[in-house]
Amino acid sequence: MDYVTNSPAETEALAEKLAARVVPGTVLALSGDLGTGKTVFTRGFARGLGITDTVNSPTFAIVNEYESHRGPFYHFDVYRIEDADELYEIGFDEYIDEPGAFILIEWPERIMNLLPKETVFIRLEKDFEQGPDYRRICIGGKDETFGH
Ligand code: ADP
Ligand code: MG
């Protein structure tokens, strides 16, 4: 599905609605260049799970963990991950296999072959001709740009 948003608030609202629909155990892979709104989207998603904590990018921590009334929420940003070994060191496979968890991963391109095949792929894109706050957001399916 393709969506358009014209503000961070709209992107958050879209993600919040999505969170209400996804089942526990879902892995979401969030692609898009720097500044397209992956972390903004994640904030809305967390809000949709009922999480009231401040959600910031876990770039340095790799993963931030939150509790929601629907289950744990793990927010990964694997931008700095060099290889699969590094990810296994932080227990990635245990996070992925945890029943009932919600998992969202920024920069999944680096770890495509480690994602479950049911992963929900989401892509955010800017289009400067449409203005600085315009974002196209594609949710679901296996976009050919993801390479699997
Ligand atoms: P990323 O995590 O993809 O690097 P961020 O979510 O950290 O990006 O930042 C996105 C930036 O773009 C924020 O400064 C936000 O205010 C701005 N922005 C402008 N328009 C939008 C929009 N429609 N959706 C999301 N963010 C937007
Ligand atoms: Mg980010």
Image (cartoon, rainbow, N blue to C red):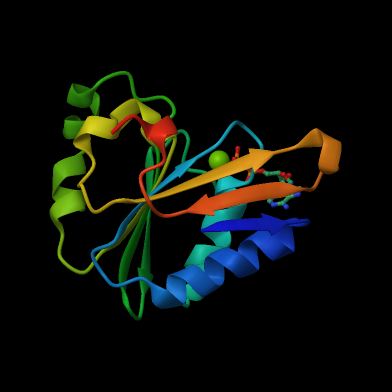
Q: Quadrant of ligand 2?
A: top right
Q: Is residue 54 visible?
A: no
Tag count: 0
Q: Is residue 49 above or below residue 54?
A: below
Which residue is at the front of the view, 144 or 33?
144
Q: Which residue: 20% across, 51% down?
A: 96
Vertical arrangement, residue 38 with respect to residue 53, above or below? above
Q: Position of residue 34 (x, y in %)?
A: 61, 31
Q: Residue furthest top?
A: 82
Residue 136 placement, left or right of 113: right
Residue 27, given in percent of the width and then of the height, sits at: 30, 55
User: Residue at coordinates 78% horizontally, 56% vertically from top-left?
Assistant: 6
Query: Which of the image's four quarters has the C terminus?
Result: top left
Query: Residue 105's x, y, as percent?
Result: 39, 45
Look at the picture and state if 119 lies above or below 108.
Answer: below
Q: Nearer the viewer, residue 86 or 106?
A: 106
Asked if one can make out residue 105 in the rendered structure from this viewpoint, the answer is yes
Say which residue appears at 25% left-offset and 64% top-offset: 101
Which residue shows up at 41% across the image and 75% down it?
21
Query: Which quarter of the figure has residue 25?
Result: bottom left
* Residue 79 location (% of width, % of height): 44, 28
Left or right, residue 85 beside residue 133: left
Q: Quadrant of residue 4?
A: bottom right
